[in-house]
Image (cartoon, coloured by chain):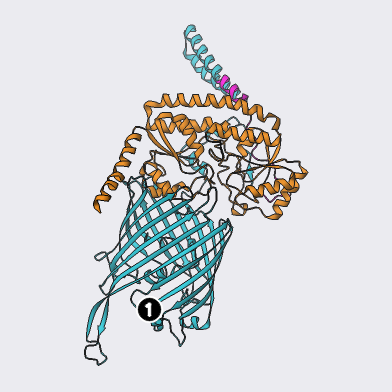
Chain colours: A orange, B cyan
């Protein structure tokens, strides 16, 4: 019996060592969401080995804390988080990973919201009667390409703490990425120009940064309040508003109820379009620029 | 432009003493040129800042008939130049305190309320044989919990929980310290230590608080072998997560052994020792299974050894993109090896002549299935079978239930539970001339969360 198990046991111990050796010279980074993984890969290049905790199709607000997330975090040098209370679930995963590098307050814990001009910061006292509000402001900034320079700067600073000799290379990677992003931004701005001022309805209020970047206006949400499912009375109000204000588009996240959005759109004579709420959220949105490309094309096609 | 004026005035103020001090006209010219360059540089930066496009307005106006929003604020307008008062204000660390807001707490706080009720037969109430023994046909606060949690410093975190609940029929609600422990987060070699008073990580459900359980009540086997509150002890636990491609967590703990149902010796000279090993596998993105095994071994007050072995399994099927699992299966089994003192009547005169030690190896298990086809609705059923730790007999129960969440922070649950006890339980469940061998109960529960609540593990 032992003869059968001996090779398996040997394999179980050797395999992780081989994997560890191959990744030993790289900075092991885990990002809470795939957008930050994509941006870290852009600036880190060959210096980093990056993984993400959430998948693009998931709701980043409430991730199920599987022990497999703890396996990813067990060996991480750096945990990059979105902050603003979007991914505070990461604390539970970190606690189960027994990795002192990334506990809150350690140098390996990086919040890339630093320097972001946060929108929708509550100016009055908030409570749960307003739904699942974010007291620190809207945390869904990562898919606004205009904020990528700040996010990538924060990532470069964090990576350079682990590889100070490679700061120049990291900065070079960042500049090369930003140059490509600038080029794409010019294209996106041209494509979105005819849509400037158009009103849209969103399912969950997570598009405000993108909408403002390109001059669109969020007129209503399908959710009654953030995180609270829509009541029939609320949907009736939204449909009436869409008809009155000639709103032709509903933006839906891949993880939300697309069927409901389609029904409302049909009633209001509009279209519902699924955008990538994170990199990998829809087919073809596998890179940061690719995801924005998809979203811009989907918006332009839907409103045209 | 006010900023520009301020800069010019500052430059001039700096220039006056410089001019007085400098006697050499060439030196004076050089200083003026240098200041002119600085002024040009500052002016240029200011011009570039002013030329930046204004930030977008934060949110569209809500429709007239929409419910009130959270009062979103506009992003701060283009920063006004600092006034003399601004410049005079204290900087760090006083500035940091002002930024956070006076009196802001540096930890999180949350309250969980859990109210339960049950309706059952009169004979069950008289015999005190319902799920909530002594609280039959009543609605009462089972657990209202105040949780305080956060980082102590960069190296440790802490959790403190106070619980209030009605523990006996009509009694005043009592408050007690449910948990208070610190976790050392930065130990080497993949280890972490927890010290204090805590719910032991023994099996899957023991660690789960009443309001977080997927059923109205704790499974019969857990209540029979570990008491109505489960295993909560004072001591220390050490966990080790090895650096492997799959998840394994090993745990060892030393505790007083205060739990009177299972142990009760209550001294570190004869401590309760616990251990657990758990692992986790993902079968694709949609299927996940957690397996674990636990052990707890300590002494009873009569100095007899009591050892409980536990096995746990939890499976979830969550279709890709779903916000909740569609199917959840949970099961735990306990096997108790316990020595008890038994009085022996050698000569048949009715008096005990000798006390001998006997082995009582008893066991129990439960298995639960939950299906959640909609985000706000779930239904399930749990089957229990359990012996008792030291007395003869056994019981089985079946409990179908339905749960409804109006929001993430509020839940209602309704269940029916049928319990059937074997004839050997006659002594334990036949009080006040009433029998509780066959029990029908309608159970209901209302739970809420106020404030912060940490995410639930798998």
Residue ranking furthest to the bottom: B349
Q: Identify which residue, B93 or A266, lies in the foreground.
A: A266
Residue A147 is one of the magenta-drawn residues:
no
- Relative horizontal placement of residue B143, taking residue A248 as reference (left or right): left
Task: Determine if residue B166 is in view.
Answer: no
Query: Which residue is tagged 1?
Result: B393
Which type of secondary structure does the marked residue at label 1 adopt?
loop
Q: Please state the horizontal and vertical placement of residue B132, each as a whole percent of the image.
A: 47, 74
Q: Is residue A259 positioned above or below B433 on the image?
A: above
Q: Identify which residue, B299 or A279, lies in the foreground.
A: A279
Tell me which segment is drawn in magenta: B42-70
Q: Please state the horizontal and vertical placement of residue B293, each as a whole percent of the image.
A: 34, 59
Residue B60 is one of the magenta-drawn residues:
yes
The residue sitting at 45% across, 86% down in the picture is: B432
Q: Identify which residue, A303 or B64, lies in the foreground.
A: A303
Quadrant that contains the N terminus of chain B: top right
Q: How many residues crowd around disc 1 within 10 Å: few (fewer than 14), some, or many (20 or more)? A: some
Residue ranking furthest to the right: A244
Q: Please state the horizontal and vertical placement of residue A90, each as a whole percent of the image.
A: 46, 46
- Relative horizontal placement of residue B41, taking residue B395 as reference (left or right): right
Quadrant that contains the C terminus of chain B: bottom left
């Amino acid at each position: 019996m032992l003869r059968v198990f001996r090779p398996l046991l040997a394999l179980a111990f050797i395999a992780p060592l081989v994997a560890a050796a191959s990744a030993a010279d790289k900075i092991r980074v885990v990002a809470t969401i795939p957008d930050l993984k994509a941006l870290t890969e852009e600036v880190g290049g060959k210096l980093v080995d990056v993984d993400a905790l959430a998948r693009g199709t998931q709701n980043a607000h409430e991730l199920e804390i599987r022990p497999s997330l703890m396996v990813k975090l067990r060996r991480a040098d750096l945990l990059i988080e979105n902050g603003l209370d979007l991914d505070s679930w990461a604390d539970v995963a970190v606690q189960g990973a027994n990795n002192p590098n990334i506990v809150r307050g350690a140098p390996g814990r990086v919040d890339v919201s630093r320097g972001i001009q946060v929108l929708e910061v509550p100016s009055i006292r908030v409570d749960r009667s307003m739904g699942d509000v974010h007291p620190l402001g809207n945390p869904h900034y990562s898919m606004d390409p205009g904020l990528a320079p700040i996010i990538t700067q924060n990532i470069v600073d964090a990576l350079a703490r682990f590889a100070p000799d490679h700061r120049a290379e990291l900065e070079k990677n960042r500049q090369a990425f930003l140059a490509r992003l600038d080029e794409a931004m010019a294209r996106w701005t041209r494509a979105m120009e005819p849509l400037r001022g158009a009103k849209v309805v969103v399912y969950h209020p997570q598009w405000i940064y993108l909408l403002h970047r390109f001059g669109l206006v969020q007129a209503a949400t399908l959710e009654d309040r953030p995180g609270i499912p829509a009541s029939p009375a609320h949907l009736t109000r939204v449909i009436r508003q869409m008809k009155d204000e000639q709103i032709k588009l509903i933006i839906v996240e891949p993880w939300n109820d697309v069927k409901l959005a389609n029904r409302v759109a049909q009633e209001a004579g509009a279209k519902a379009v699924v955008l990538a709420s994170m990199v990998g959220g829809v087919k073809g949105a596998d890179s940061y620029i690719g995801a924005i490309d998809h979203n811009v094309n989907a918006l332009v096609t839907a409103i045209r | 432009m006010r900023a520009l004026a301020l800069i010019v005035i500052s430059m001039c103020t700096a220039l006056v003493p410089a001019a007085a001090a400098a006697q050499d006209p060439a030196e004076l010219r050089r200083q003026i040129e240098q200041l002119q360059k600085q002024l040009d540089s500052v002016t240029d930066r200011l011009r570039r800042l002013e030329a930046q496009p204004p930030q977008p307005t934060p949110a569209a106006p809500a429709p007239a008939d929409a419910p009130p929003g959270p009062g979103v604020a506009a992003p701060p307008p283009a920063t006004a130049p600092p006034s003399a008062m601004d410049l005079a204000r204290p900087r760090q660390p006083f500035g940091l305190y002002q930024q956070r807001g006076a009196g802001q707490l540096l930890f999180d706080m949350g309250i969980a309320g859990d109210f339960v009720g049950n309706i059952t037969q009169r004979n069950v109430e008289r015999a005190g044989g319902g799920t909530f023994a002594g609280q039959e046909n009543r609605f009462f606060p089972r657990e209202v919990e105040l949780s305080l949690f956060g980082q102590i410093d960069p190296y440790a975190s802490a959790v403190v929980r106070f619980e209030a609940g009605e523990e006996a029929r009509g009694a005043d609600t009592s408050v007690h310290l449910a948990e208070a422990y610190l976790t050392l987060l930065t130990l080497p070699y993949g280890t972490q230590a927890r010290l204090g008073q805590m719910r032991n990580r023994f099996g899957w459900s023991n660690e789960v608080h009443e309001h977080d359980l997927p059923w109205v009540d704790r499974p019969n086997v857990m209540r029979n072998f570990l008491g109505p509150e489960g295993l909560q002890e004072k001591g220390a636990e050490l966990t080790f997560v090895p650096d492997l491609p799959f998840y394994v967590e090993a745990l060892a703990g030393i505790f007083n052994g205060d739990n009177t149902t299972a142990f009760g010796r209550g001294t570190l000279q004869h401590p309760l020792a616990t251990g657990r090993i758990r692992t986790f596998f993902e079968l694709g993105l949609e299927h996940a299974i957690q397996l674990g095994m636990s052990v707890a071994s300590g002494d009873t007050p009569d100095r007899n050894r009591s050892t409980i072995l536990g096995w746990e399994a939890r499976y979830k099927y969550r279709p890709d993109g779903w916000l909740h699992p569609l199917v959840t299966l949970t099961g735990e089994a306990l096997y108790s090896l316990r020595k008890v003192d038994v009085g022996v009547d050698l000569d048949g005169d009715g008096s005990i002549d000798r006390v001998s030690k006997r082995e009582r190896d008893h066991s129990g298990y439960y298995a639960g299935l939950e299906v959640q086809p909609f985000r706000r609705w779930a239904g399930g059923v749990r089957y229990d079978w359990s012996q008792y730790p030291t007395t003869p007999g056994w019981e089985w129960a079946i409990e179908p239930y339905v749960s409804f969440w109006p929001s993430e922070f509020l839940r209602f649950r309704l269940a029916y539970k049928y319990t059937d006890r074997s004839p050997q339980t006659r002594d334990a469940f036949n009080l006040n001339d009433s029998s509780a061998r066959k029990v029908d109960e309608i159970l209901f529960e209302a739970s809420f969360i106020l404030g912060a609540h940490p995410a639930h593990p798998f």
